[in-house]
C-alpha cells in the first residue's frame, strides 16, 4: 500500500532540469545497450540468481514535461526517449601560411628597404645646401600725352603684367643661365658637393648647356604671383656666399633685361616723335616759302590791310556823293534850269560816281567782272591759314619730341626689389625629414595597393 505522503512529496519535489533528464536518459540507454550486448554474447556467464527483495512499493516519479520547440531556435529539440547526438568540431590552431610570408617580404622590399636606403643617403651622403632668397617686381611709370606733359600731369602706375610675364620666362631661359655661368662658373659652384659622393643633388661636370639648364631648374626655384606681379626666387648652393652671388647676379641681369625693353620702347617713341617733328618742319617751311613768293609777286605784304584802305576810300566817296546829290536836288528846286551852279554840281556828282566805280573795280567788286584783287586776297588768306596750321603742328611736334627725349633720359620701366639677396647662416637643404617622410608614405601607399590587388585576385579564384 502506498504511502499517503508520497504524492505530496512528489508534488513538492522540483521538476528536474530537461538537459539533465536527457543526459540521464541517454546514459541509461547506453547502459541498457551494453547489457544487451553482453547478454547476447556466448561467452557471457549466467548471472547469479538473486533472491528478490521484499516487494516495496516504487516511488512515484514525476512525469517528464513534454518537449517543446525552442522559440529562439527554428530547430526542434530531440525527443527525451532518444539520445542527443551533438557533434562538436574542435578549432584548429592558426598557422602562418605562404601568403603571409609574401606580404611580409613585399613590405620589406617595397617599404622598409626604400625607407632605409633613403635615410642612409640623406643623412650620410647628401651634402648640406644653403639658400639665398630675393624678391622683386616690375614697376612702370606711365606718362600722358604731350598736352598733359606740358601741364605737368603724370601718374605712377603699378606693375605691368606683360613685362612681368616676359621676365618670368627670361628667368627660365638658357640665355640667363649662360650669362650667369659666364660670370660665376656655375659648373664649379654646383659641383662642390662631389658628385661621386652625392650623385643625386650635385652637378656632374662638365655637361652641356642643356644639362646646366636642367640643373638650374633644380637649384633656382621661381615663385610667381600672377595677381600681384611679385616674383620670388630661392637659390641653392653649397656655400652661402655663392648662393647670394648667384641671386644678386640674377637680379642684375633681370634689371638689365627690363631696361633693354624700356630702351626699345623709348627709342620707338623718340623715333616717332622725330619723324613727326621733321614733317612739321617741312610743312612750315613750305608754307613760309609760298607766302614769301606771293608777296614778291604781288608787291603786297598784307592784302587785307590794302583792302581796308580801299574800302575806307569808297565809303568816303559815297558820303561825298550823297552830299552832292542833296545839293543838286536843292538847286533844282530853288533855281532856274540853266543855272550854272546846277551844271557844276552835276559835274561833281559824275566825277564822284566815276571814282567810286574805279575803286570798286580795284577791289574786284566792279560790274566789269575784274576780280584780280579779290583773288589776291583769297590766295593770301589760304597761304596764311596754311602757315598758321603748320606753325601749330610744329609746336605740338616739338613739344612731343622734347617729352619723348625727357622720358628717354629717365627710367620709366624698372625692376624694384622688395627682398634683397639674403645670406644664409645655416644649411636648411635638403629637407631630410620631409623627403624621408614623403618617400616612406608613398612607398606604404604603393605597397598597400599592391597587397589589396593581390588579395582581390586571390579571392576571385
Image (tube, rainbow, N blue to C red):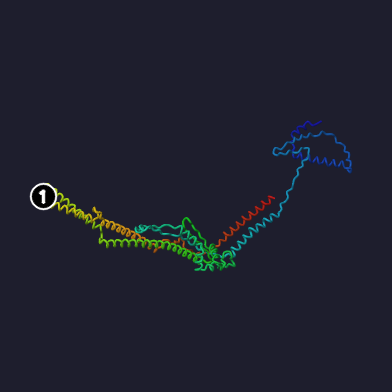
* x then y, percent, for residue 429: 54, 62
* x then y, percent, for residue 354: 19, 54
Q: What element carries label 1?
A: loop
Left or right: 399 as drawn, with respect to 93:
left
Left or right: 293 as drawn, with respect to 226:
left
* x then y, percent, for residue 189: 53, 68
Residue appearing at x 58%, y 59% in the figure: 435
Viewer-closest of 233 and 372? 372
Viewer-closest of 398 and 90? 398
Query: Is any atom of residue 282 visible in this view?
Result: yes
Viewer-closest of 438 and 221? 221
* x then y, percent, for residue 187: 54, 68
Residue appearing at x 74%, y 40% in the figure: 19
Left or right: 50 as drawn, with respect to 155:
right
In the rendered view, tell whether residue 237 sits above or below residue 348: below
Give the crowd class for mark 1: few <14, some 14-19, many >=20 residues within 10 Å: few
Q: Mark 1 points at which residue?
A: 338
Residue reaching furthest front? 338
The quadrant in which residue 310 appears is bottom left
Amino acid at each position: 500500500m502506498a504511502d499517503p505522503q508520497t504524492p505530496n512529496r512528489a508534488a513538492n519535489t522540483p521538476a528536474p532540469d530537461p538537459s539533465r533528464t536527457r543526459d540521464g536518459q541517454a546514459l541509461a540507454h547506453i547502459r541498457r545497450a551494453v547489457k544487451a550486448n553482453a547478454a547476447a554474447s556466448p561467452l557471457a556467464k549466467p548471472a547469479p540468481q538473486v533472491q528478490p527483495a521484499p516487494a516495496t512499493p516504487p516511488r512515484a516519479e514525476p512525469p517528464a514535461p513534454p518537449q517543446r520547440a525552442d522559440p529562439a531556435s527554428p530547430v526542434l529539440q530531440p525527443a527525451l526517449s532518444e539520445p542527443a547526438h551533438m557533434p562538436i568540431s574542435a578549432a584548429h590552431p592558426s598557422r602562418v601560411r605562404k601568403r603571409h610570408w609574401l606580404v611580409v617580404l613585399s613590405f620589406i622590399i617595397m617599404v622598409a628597404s626604400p625607407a632605409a636606403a633613403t635615410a642612409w643617403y640623406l643623412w650620410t651622403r647628401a651634402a648640406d645646401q644653403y639658400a639665398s632668397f630675393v624678391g622683386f617686381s616690375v614697376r612702370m611709370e606711365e606718362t600722358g600725352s604731350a598736352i598733359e606733359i606740358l601741364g605737368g600731369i603724370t601718374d605712377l602706375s603699378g606693375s605691368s603684367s606683360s613685362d612681368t610675364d616676359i621676365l618670368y620666362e627670361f628667368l627660365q631661359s638658357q640665355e640667363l643661365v649662360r650669362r650667369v655661368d659666364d660670370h660665376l662658373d656655375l659648373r664649379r659652384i654646383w659641383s662642390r658637393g662631389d658628385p661621386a659622393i652625392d650623385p643625386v643633388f650635385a652637378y656632374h661636370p662638365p655637361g652641356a648647356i642643356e644639362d646646366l639648364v636642367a640643373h638650374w631648374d633644380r637649384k633656382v626655384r621661381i615663385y610667381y604671383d600672377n595677381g600681384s606681379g611679385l616674383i620670388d626666387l630661392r637659390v641653392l648652393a653649397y656655400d652661402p656666399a655663392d648662393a647670394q652671388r648667384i641671386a644678386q647676379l640674377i637680379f642684375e641681369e633681370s634689371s638689365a633685361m627690363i631696361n633693354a625693353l624700356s630702351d626699345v620702347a623709348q627709342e620707338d617713341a623718340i623715333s616717332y616723335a622725330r619723324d613727326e617733328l621733321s614733317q612739321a618742319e617741312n610743312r612750315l617751311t613750305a608754307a613760309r616759302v609760298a607766302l614769301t613768293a606771293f608777296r614778291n609777286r604781288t608787291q603786297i605784304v598784307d592784302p587785307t590791310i590794302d583792302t581796308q584802305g580801299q574800302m575806307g576810300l569808297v565809303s568816303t566817296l559815297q558820303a561825298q556823293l550823297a552830299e552832292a546829290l542833296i545839293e543838286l536836288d536843292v538847286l533844282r528846286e530853288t533855281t532856274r534850269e540853266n543855272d550854272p551852279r546846277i551844271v557844276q554840281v552835276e559835274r561833281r556828282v559824275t566825277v564822284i560816281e566815276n571814282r567810286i566805280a574805279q575803286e570798286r573795280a580795284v577791289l574786284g567788286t566792279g560790274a566789269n567782272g575784274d576780280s584780280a584783287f579779290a583773288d589776291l586776297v583769297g590766295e593770301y588768306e589760304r597761304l596764311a591759314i596754311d602757315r598758321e596750321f603748320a606753325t601749330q603742328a610744329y609746336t605740338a611736334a616739338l613739344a612731343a619730341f622734347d617729352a619723348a627725349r625727357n622720358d628717354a633720359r629717365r627710367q620709366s620701366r624698372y625692376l624694384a626689389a622688395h627682398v634683397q639677396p639674403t645670406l644664409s647662416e645655416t644649411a636648411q637643404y635638403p629637407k631630410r625629414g620631409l623627403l624621408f617622410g614623403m618617400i616612406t608614405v608613398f612607398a606604404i601607399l604603393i605597397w598597400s595597393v599592391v597587397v589589396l590587388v593581390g588579395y582581390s585576385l586571390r579571392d576571385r579564384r
